[in-house]
Amino acid sequence: MTRNSFLAMLTIWLVVLGLPCSSKMYDFNSCIYNENDRDIVANCSKGNFTDVPQGFAENVTVIDLSQNEITSIEKMSFPYRLMVHTLSMSCNSLTHLDSDSLKNLPHLSKLDLRGNKINCTSSSLPPGLFRDLPLKRLLLSDMNIEQIHDDLEYAEETFLDLNQLEELAIDLPPNPLFGVGFGSLTNLRTLTVRYCQTNNLNTSAFEVFTKFNLTTFQINACNKGHVDTNITDVFPYLDILDIRNTVRTDLSQRLVNLNNYENASMQRISFIANTARYEQCFMLSTNDTRFLVTMCVSEVYLVGNRIRIIEGGALIQPPFSQCLRVLDLSHNMILEEYDLFQTLFFYTHFASFHFEQHEKDLKQYNDHIYKFYDSHSIFQDTNRMVWPGNEPQTCVFSVSAETRESEVNPQSESSVLAYLMFFPRNLTTLYFAPALRPFVNINHDVHFFGSERWSKVVFSNCSVVAYDVSIFGLNNLQSLEISGNGFLGQPTTLMKSFPNIKNLSLNHITEGFEGIADNIESVLGHFQHLQNLHLLDNNLTDLPRNVEKITNIRLIDVSYNSIKELSVGTRKRLDAVAQKKNISVNLRGNVLSCGCGSLEFISWSMDSFVLFVDGHHYMCRNDNGEIIHLTNIADSYMKIWRSCVSFFSLLFSICFFFLLFLGFSLSLHIARNVNLLKRWSVKWLGLDFQQHFKYDVFVYHSSKDDRRWVCSTLKQKLEDERDLRLCIPDRDFEPGVYTCEEVLGAINNSWKTIIYLTQTFLEDELCSFRLSSAVYLGDNLKSDRFIILFSDAVFRHPLPPIINQLLDEDNRFPLEEFHKSSLWDQLHSRILSKD
């Protein structure tokens, strides 16, 4: 930063910090300060101000307060002297300015008050307002006043002080009269008036200006007013003549009334939207242009005049054709749109051609109003043309050329059938947007002549299908856009027609894009100078494979596609290239995925050497389907990471505690049912129960019963003869009265249990109690685990409930029949059974 720049910025801060606080003190950040080679600019536009903000640096030179809600400029609006030479107050709600409101702007030379509510009378512009100000440009037009009174009188005394004024723009009342107060404007060179009245505007209104040497005269009649055809008679020395938006006078009458300028030289003639309201169309004939073609005019604008046909020779006769550099025939109703190309070659010094027609231009009456100024006009040094923005999705063929110090490469010649197109060699700007008939498909070679210096060509939104043909004459082209069109097959040959391309746009390709994306190396791999590749709106889900291998590629723009994240393979290839050179990717307009499954991609985008263009405009969709704007990738990553970690932590905690509870419950259940599990294993897994149980059978009987049968007969038949392991309480329990726990332990440690049921058993209440307690405390003890040996006498008495519960058809054996050997075999089988 230079010393002067440093002092300028230091002054700004000192002034702001040193000013006292007040109700009108606005935050310093409300205005944006910029500095260039000539000026310090305070941009306060669109700041929602209702008063002039305070705190401007004393050395600020340009203040832009346009598009706010300021209603007046008062004495203390600028409380101290400023170095301001340009002040824009356009598009506010100003109704008046105090007489001393501008006295602290002694260097003010440009003042823009357009788009307010000032009626230019002494009440809104009081005398002395402009005294001692070196004003050279004053814009007082385009006011938002519903109705101007017929008897309105300008603030004559106020305008007496504008003896240095060079440009004046002002609104006219129904019966305008510029009085003697305007006689002091001796330096006036440009007069722009807006006449939005239904009356006639004639020459008498401008008699006071006949004493001046006006060079620019501009009238906007707002599609309401009628401007006399001889209005220009009072200004014979004009350099720029612009009459637009008039009614009841068509282009033919305007052109014929150029008779006063026959053989004259002018910079610009603009007849824009000069129509008789009820006339449907107009033919531009040689009779209409008989005076125009005698003139040497650099720029001609015949826009919006409903021209239907241009007669041959109407605009190509010398000296007119030799002097013309700029021609605009847009927004007419021209039928033979493509014939205009054939006339361009006749203009030997031609530099710019503009032609566009839209469907609405073909209607009988188009009420579009073409204005003279925009929000930037006051800041421009030249009186440039102001046009509305181009409509989207318009079929366009445009050319831009530049002057190069080095010699251009010679054109290659075509030896096959080709379309021939001739253009002036000095052409620098061409904009052609037809409406009636689209371009035809390109199925033959095309040869351009006069295009050696073309640097940029745009051919977009024409729905043309191009075959793989050659284009000759565009060898030096550096920028090419073929958007909104299609290709038949791989356009390898066509792309080789532009060997020096640096910028290539293949946006919204309507047909054949898959062939390009799948074969990117063969189609575009030959470009040695290509740096920027734009592939917008092609429904891509990833970068085309190997696109990063183009030799000098620097930017891969895949904005507004369907990419959720770059694949792992694409990331690896980009990282490999980024290690060797700078490479950028633009993913703007793609709804990326920022769910938990995409954390790896987001982390890679932060750590990779690949640069992401317009990253603060990226957006993504999270796992809940919400769209999130990524103003900062690092901050967004941390938010997503915390969201994902918190979710997984919660899920993990729930699962962990569930498994812990399940494990605890299962362990407790296993501990309580270990014998049941052992039996289940033996039954369903076919295991040997003798390896898992201490006894094969537990014999339960009353301690008061006769033990001889149990300890001798039963033991001999089962244990001695059949090798079963018996648990007999009198033998295997601890001496003394055995308890319920011992009974339960014996039942659980035995595969089966035999109940020796006799009359004595039924009479022994303690015996029944011990059995009942053991069964109820046991692990799901069912009847199939018990075998009942009974005597017939027991059924003559009521049985205990526990016996009824365990009694089954298959598990009872009568003691009276054990003299049979077969019954012992049945008992043995029952003990060994797994049912």
Image (spheres, rainbow, N blue to C red):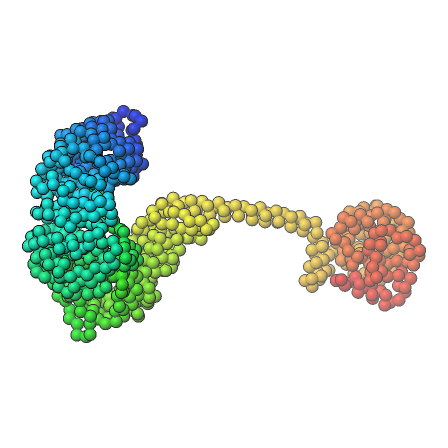
In the orientation shown, which residue stands out farthest toward the bottom?
416
- Residue under the image location 18 percent in, 45 percent down: 201
The quarter of the image holding the N terminus is top left
Left/right placement of residue 363 relative to residue 325 reads right
Query: Could you say where residue 199 lies in the image, as x and y percent from the top left?
Result: 22, 44
Left/right placement of residue 709 relative to residue 349 reads right
Residue 415 in view:
yes
Residue 34 in view:
no
Image quarter for residue 496?
bottom left
- Residue under the image location 19 percent in, 35 percent down: 154
Query: Could you say where residue 773 lies in the image, as x and y percent from the top left?
Result: 80, 47
Q: Where 289 sits versus 1, above or below?
A: below
Total numbered badges shown on the rendered structure: 0
Q: Where 645 sits versus 827, above or below?
A: above
775, 79: nearer the viewer: 79
531, 505: nearer the viewer: 505
The quarter of the image holding the C terminus is bottom right
